[in-house]
Amino acid sequence: MTAALSPLLEERPAEGVVCLRLHRPAVLNALDLALRRALAGAFARLDSDPSARAIVIAGGERAFCAGADLQEYVDATPVEVEARRLGALWDAIARCRKPVIAAVRGHALGGGCELAMHADIVVAGEGASFGQPEVMIGLMPGGGATQRLPRLIGKHQAMRLMLLGEPVDAAEALRLGLVSEVVPDADVEGRAFAIAARLARGPQHAIQAIRHAVIEGMSTPLQQGLELERRSFQWLFATRDKTEGIRARMERRRPAFGDAV
């Protein structure tokens, strides 16, 4: 498939940084099965690619992702939907060990909002909007929003978004804790790439250990999460990056991290 026809474009804006760009502009980057499979395949591949140390998910100016492609849902039966194995496609993104930044311009609705929630850091443009409007068409979220959204913004605000189906703007999303920061629309991708480049230069073992402890801790009892944190903290003392980082701080210089992962 040529780049012009591919539903997912791969770019390398900086060393160690991969940008996965949703590329279905005619339908506001709606998620059809081909795009879902392309995303899952890319994340699985990049997870084991040592040259990829940070991943940015981006869309277009009008939309990050407007949700599921309803053409594939209108006449679908439960058996047909189950056969698509959508859970496995979402899991391929969730299980990626590399830090993920979502660069959101325009609409991030339904599956698009859920895709953004899979990221570790969300950079939103001032004109972005977020929401879970599935209830408006007689459905419910199916990409993790019923579980991730309450953990991110609390039960009552999550219920408001999912039961009423009304979107919120970028400023409200920031207030709720759904996004990390809001910047002018024209600066979204530049800011996301800058964050990704900084992560790509950082100590990879420590970054992955932090991500693992936070993500696992969100679904485990506090004491179990604390034990995971302690074990990971102790394990990092076996890395060269730990020694380099401390020596650089003591010598008042920039650290040169480079431990292989």
Image (cartoon, rainbow, N blue to C red):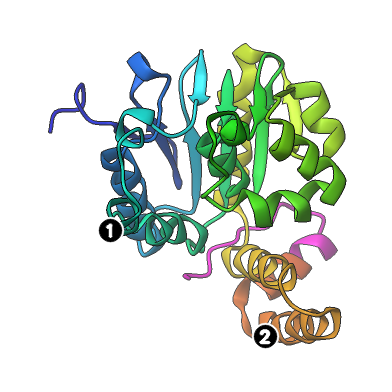
Q: Examine the rendered structure and indicate whether residue 200 appears above or below residue 113.
A: below
Disc 2 is placed on an element classified as helix
Q: Which residues are magenta?
A: 247-261
Marked residue nearer the N-terminal end (2 or 1): 1
- How crowded pointer 2 is (Cα within 10 Å; few <14, some 14-19, many 20+) is rated as few
Query: Looking at the image, which residue is at 62% across and 22% down?
Result: 188
Residue placed under numbered mark 2 in the picture: 235
The residue positioned 54% from the left and 36% from the top of the image is 138
181 to the left or right of 44: right
Classify 247 as above or below 229. Answer: above
Q: Position of residue 93 (x, y in %)?
A: 46, 55
Q: How many marks?
A: 2
Tell me residue 162's x, y (percent).
69, 39
Residue highlighted by disc 1 = 83
Label 1 crowding class (10 Å Cα cut-off): few <14, some 14-19, many 20+?
few
Residue 143 within the magenta-colored segment of the rendering: no
Q: Main secondary structure of the magenta part?
A: loop
- 163 left or right of 205 in image: right
Looking at this view, is 110 or 175 the one in front? 110
